[in-house]
Amino acid sequence: MSERPPATENPWQQLRQLTPARIALGRAGTSLPTRAQLDFQFAHAQARDAVHLPFDAKPLSDALQQRGLDTLHLRSAAEDRHTYLQRPDLGRRLHADSGAQLDTYAAQHGTGKDLAIVIADGLSSLAVHRHSLPFLERLLEQVTAEGWSLAPISLVEQGRVAVADEVGERLGAKMTVILIGERPGLSSPDSLGLYFTYAPRVGLNDAYRNCISNVRLEGLSYGMATFRLMYLMREACRRQLSGVDLKDEAETPTLEGGQTGNFLLPDQR
């Protein structure tokens, strides 16, 4: 009887300590080891659950109102999750009732705010439930310090990124930021995405937006995401544009000697 284990270890096994990516899994004959196969099935189930988890907007709305922030509960033109997944175009527009709700609010309270923040479930309500509030606490602290006026925070069920353009246009906001659950990966079912648009209006495409991705505890920290977003908003106000013409050139603080830098740009020294 052979005492060799049924699974053959991969010589790159130590690299797995540096990344959650599925590398160096080993093999059992020509197949994956049982543990790796079960881990994959578990991660796939987590991703599916994140996509179908209903958006529970009330606790988030209550928490924001406790902080003295006005909120509006809206929904997109997609009637349910099944329709939302099959008709992305409906998730980009507000339901007629929600559009009328925004128009009524704008008529009663006026327009012209500097920033409209939108929170939408997207493809991962789990990400919104976990990360939107702690991120907003950091963002709103900076927005207040800048002296920018804020429209009511809109919570949109069955929403996609472009729905923020309609919200911003109806409220007459100078800028919009949407916090939205990103498509789950097999190692990141709770990744939050931020999309920023200057001068929002219905019909804009992604070329007019700036994206900050993977906001979560294991990815981009809340503080760093806030730092990058504030840079984009300041530059957008100065240059009156967003999207492909607005690059993220923020100098990121480093740990060595208090220096700053941007890993996306070549070293200028």
Image (tube, rainbow, N blue to C red):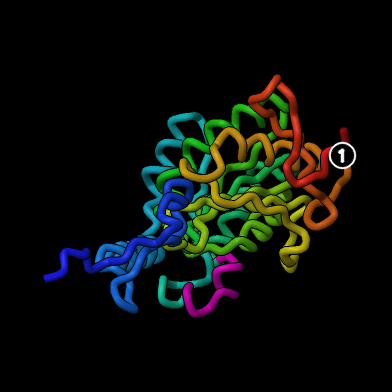
- x%, y% of residue 133? 47, 39
Magenta span: predominant SS is: helix
- x%, y% of residue 75? 50, 62
Residue toward you, 27 or 65: 27
In this picture, which residue range is highlighted in magenta?
Answer: 84-94
Residue toward you, 102 or 258: 258
Q: Residue at x 75, y 39 (%)?
A: 262
Q: Residue furthest front?
A: 1
Mark 1: secondary structure: helix
Q: Is residue 232 left or right of residue 194?
A: right
Q: Which quadrant of the rendered structure holds the C terminus?
A: top right
Q: Is residue 264 above or below residue 84?
A: above
Q: Residue at x 46, y 41 (%)?
A: 217
Residue toward you, 59 or 43: 43
- x%, y% of residue 142? 65, 29
Q: Residue furthest left?
A: 1
Instruction: Tell whether position 243 is magenta.
Output: no
Q: Residue at x 48, y 36 (%)?
A: 134
Q: Which residue is mark 1?
A: 238
Q: The disc labelled 1 sits on which kind of residue? A: Arg
Q: Residue furthest top?
A: 257
**Does residue 12 appear in this view?**
yes
Q: Is residue 88 above or below residue 120?
A: below
Residue toward you, 188 or 98: 188
**Count of numbered tags:** 1
- x%, y% of residue 52? 37, 66
**Does residue 45 appear in this view?**
no
The image quarter containing residue 36 is bottom left
Label 1: how many residues lie within 10 Å, few (<14), some (14-19) or many (20+)?
A: few
Q: Which quadrant of the rendered structure holds the N terminus?
A: bottom left
Q: Residue at x 61, y 40 (%)?
A: 225
